[in-house]
Image: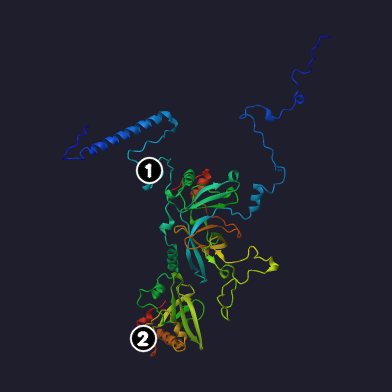
Amino acid sequence: MSVTPSTTRPLANLKQAIRQCRAERAQHRRHYAAATESLYPSLQTRYPPPTPGFRPSQAIKQNRFEIGLRKIPVIPPPPSTAKAVPDPIASLTSLQLSTLDPASFRRRLFSALNPDRARVGDILLVRLKSGEPFSGVCINIRARNSPIDTAVLLRNNLTRVAVEMWFKIFSPGVSGIEVVRRKEGRRARRAKLYYMRLPKHDIGSVEGVTRTYLRGRQGGAPTGGGGGANKGKKKSKN
Amino acid sequence: MPPRQTPTRLFAVPPTFLCPSIPRQHLRTILSITKPIPKPSRFNASPHLPVLGTSHTAALARKSRTLPLRTGALAIKKGMTALYDAESAKRTPCTVLQLDRVQILGVKTRKEHGYWALQVGAGTKEARNVTRPERGHYAKQGVPLKRHIAEFRVKDEAGLIPTGTNLTADLFSVGQYIDAKADSRGMGFAGGMKRHGFHGQPASHGNSLTHRAMGSAGASQGSGSRVLPGKKMAGRMGGEQVTVQSLRVMSVDRELGIVVVAGAVPGPKGCVVKVQDAIKKPWPDAVWPPTEVVEAMREGVEKVPAAA
């Protein structure tokens, strides 16, 4: 353990000196621990001493707060229904639609993916389970967060009295929905056609159009069915 | 002096009735073999007397008509939808409640706690976020950690279920009525019009900046020259427990874990709802409990091992 400074390597003995200090410090610590063991046997912990280099702050940073404490058994949780079925309302809706709309006719008629869907501005005819069928121009299709409650608002003039009626498309009371006539000209430039309530834009009664359509469907009368261009579109019903 | 004669004794050992009475407290005996001395009761309670009003027996008897016969469950409010009836075409707005990991965590008995109840837990929680005393309770009961815990009081021991039993949606049957308890949506600091239905002031006719104000807070000198305590004013509204009674169960699905009830349930989407049999309707004929519970009860098992 000579400490002769070298000319070429002035810090050559520094490492050795530090090692010596560390060893002496460890020796002192061990000596001190041994002393306390003999003086206070009841204060000795029954747990193994920490590994050399252990620092409590490191353990806490690793989120290990319960070192040295008795381990409490934790039973794993059972499988979760909420995780397996995160959206039970969607499941319930599809379950209902499988009975109310088994062949998806109604869904397809109003589906955004269908290019031949019913749109605002079209004249629709709604057949009911009980009551007279109602036809009118569709001025609103309400499909909010609850798909089962999708509804259409139809406007018609019955004996010069304007009537608007809402119909829930998936209701069992609605037995059929047919597109009587597509909107003429360009597609409506807004989703809700409330301007049709104004006399300037009100198309009035759709009785004539509906009667023509129904006659065309039944037999193919000379005036029925409109032009050849409309023939393909009329098949979308129910 | 004449010689003193020893007096003749009547008895070798004096009989008990002649002995002075020594209270038992002053006797030095072996406590483990003698019977404990009953403490004198302050009250006039005995099997031969009518039941005292301030007793567990009387309290349970008073509540026996309104306590449900069986447990309820904790459910999460998932949202609202509508159910259509195929024949009548009637539309019923409904709330969907989902049961997630609902288990019995423990029982309360009359002998130990003074009443009959079931401790029910739902959901799960990180072990490091549960305090050690709570973790000890779960470990002792042999059940997993739960996020939400509530007690459901039952009428008597017939409604108790072994600890660890999983409660599923088919605890409730279609057509029965339930009471739903949940914390209502918080409205924050709400004004008088929203909180108490005050009518406010006119919108026009010269009204300046005082359309929704409270107006007067009471009479003057005649009312004590003060605002009376309890005066309805603006303040925090909502965020408290609300019970909606007698909601009809429209649909139950065990696989989805949902109970669909007609009408609205307090609280926002995702809140915890306490669901139990309606107290204002006839008690339902329970289709529940499932086979595992019945078998456990038959065997006299107190705890059902928590199935992973």
Badge 1: few (under 14), some or many (20 or more) residues near its Cα, within 10 Å? few
Mark 2, secondary structure of its residue: loop
The answer to whether one can see residue B263 in this image is no
Q: Considering depth in this image, is B281 or B200 the residue closer to the camera?
A: B200
Percent position of residue B225, x then y? 67, 66
The answer to whether one can see residue B105 in this image is yes
Is residue B212 depicted above or below B23 in this figure?
below
Is residue A24 depicted above or below B253 in this figure?
above
Report the mark closest to the observer, 1 or 2.
1
Mark drawn on residue A56:
1
Q: Considering depth in this image, is B223 or A153 the residue closer to the camera?
A: B223
Percent position of residue A46, x then y? 41, 34
Q: Would residue A217 be found to the left or right of residue B4 on screen?
A: left
Q: What residue is disc 2 on?
A: A185
Percent position of residue B44, x then y? 72, 43
The chain to which mark 1 is attached is: A
Percent position of residue A150, x then y? 45, 73
Task: Point out the tag, 1 or 2, that comes first from the N-terminus.
Answer: 1
| Point 61% across, 72% down: residue | B215
Q: Considering depth in this image, is B43 or B249 the residue closer to the camera?
A: B43
Distance, label 1 to label 2, CA atoms, is 79 Å
Q: Would residue B77 be found to the left or right of residue B21 on screen?
A: left
* Quadrant location of the C terminus of chain A in the rendered image: bottom left
What kind of residue is marked 2?
Gly
Mark 1, secondary structure of its residue: helix
Badge 2: few (under 14), some or many (20 or more) residues near its Cα, within 10 Å? few
* Quadrant location of the N terminus of chain A in the rendered image: top left
Question: Can you tell which quarter of the image residue B176 is in?
Answer: bottom right
What kind of residue is marked 1?
Pro
